[in-house]
Amino acid sequence: MSTALEIDAVSRTFAGVRGGPPTAALLPTTLAVADNDFITIVGPSGCGKSTLLRIVAGLDRPTAGHVRLDGHAVTGPGADRGMVFQSYTLFPWLTVIDNIKFGLREKAMPEARAAQIAAHYVDKVGLRGFERHYPKMLSGGMQQRTAIARALANEPRILLLDEPFGALDNQTRSLMQELLLSIWESERKTVLFVTHDIEEAIFMANRVVVMTARPGRVKTDVSVTLGHPRHYTVKTTAPFSALKAKLTEEIRAEVLKAAEPQP
């Protein structure tokens, strides 16, 4: 399997506030993401997960190191990367269908083709019948379905998700996990997914990357060998529980480290 994304010794240090000392958010971090892989990233709060994702998205620049997608250096945002945030980031003045078509229109795609692609993803995310609704008329889960459909409609090489279900209630969150996983199983997009939820990380991924306490770096990279198609009942199986116990201990050790008094 070829490598789609290469994160090569990427670090990020932020300037100090009001002349204070600089803050190291990421130590040199190296990660290879294979084509069609689904990787989740977990770790203590403030460990640099979102910073790393923003660097891959081209929304931030590393202090050192390089990011390459299909061998090309990432120097800024691009249509080859689709980003989904925890906040829904929909255009409130556009309907569901027009939000989904936004990136396609920006690329000057013919309207008939844009409508065809948008309709495909409306069906994929279960929003048929809501195409003409505005975001304010939708639940949180439906807004996030729209955001995911918009990102996928642009046909990115890699999908980047930063706590996309963090603002949803537990039941909706579980359904959204199943929805996104089913889309990945059918379309095999390359996915990098940041989450605080260990169960979510295991259920969604082929690999779970655990980061250390700040300044973050990759602590461990755990393969998830649970089969596909993956049903939600896998969460009650012994292999799933064993993975959860292992990752809980890994992250707990980092949380305790972060809580230690600094010299």
Image (spheres, rainbow, N blue to C red):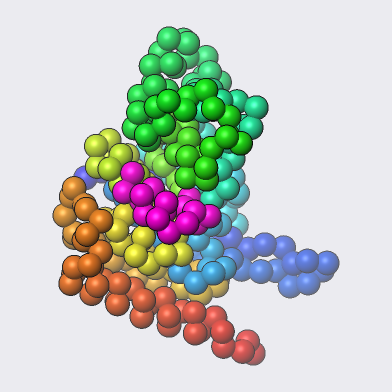
Horizontal side, residue 86 vs residue 180: left or right: right
Q: Camera-side residue: 151 or 231?
A: 231
Residue 46, given in percent of the width and then of the height, sits at: 57, 68
Which span is picked out in magenta? 163-179
Residue 133, given in percent of the width and then of the height, sits at: 54, 27
**Quarter of the figure with residue 11:** bottom right
Q: Camera-side residue: 210 or 55?
A: 210
Q: Is residue 53 visible?
A: no
Query: Which quarter of the rendering shows the C terminus?
Result: bottom right
Q: Is residue 241 visible?
A: yes
Q: Which residue occupies 24% across, 42% down? A: 185
Q: Which residue occupies 42% across, 25% down? A: 129
Residue 198, given in percent of the width and then of the height, sits at: 37, 67
Q: Which residue occupies 61% across, 36% down? A: 136
Q: Camera-side residue: 121 or 13?
A: 121
Horizontal side, residue 188 vs residue 99: left or right: left
Residue 121, given in percent of the width and then of the height, sits at: 38, 28
**Is 79 contained in the magenta span?**
no
Query: Which quarter of the rendering shows the N terminus?
Result: top left
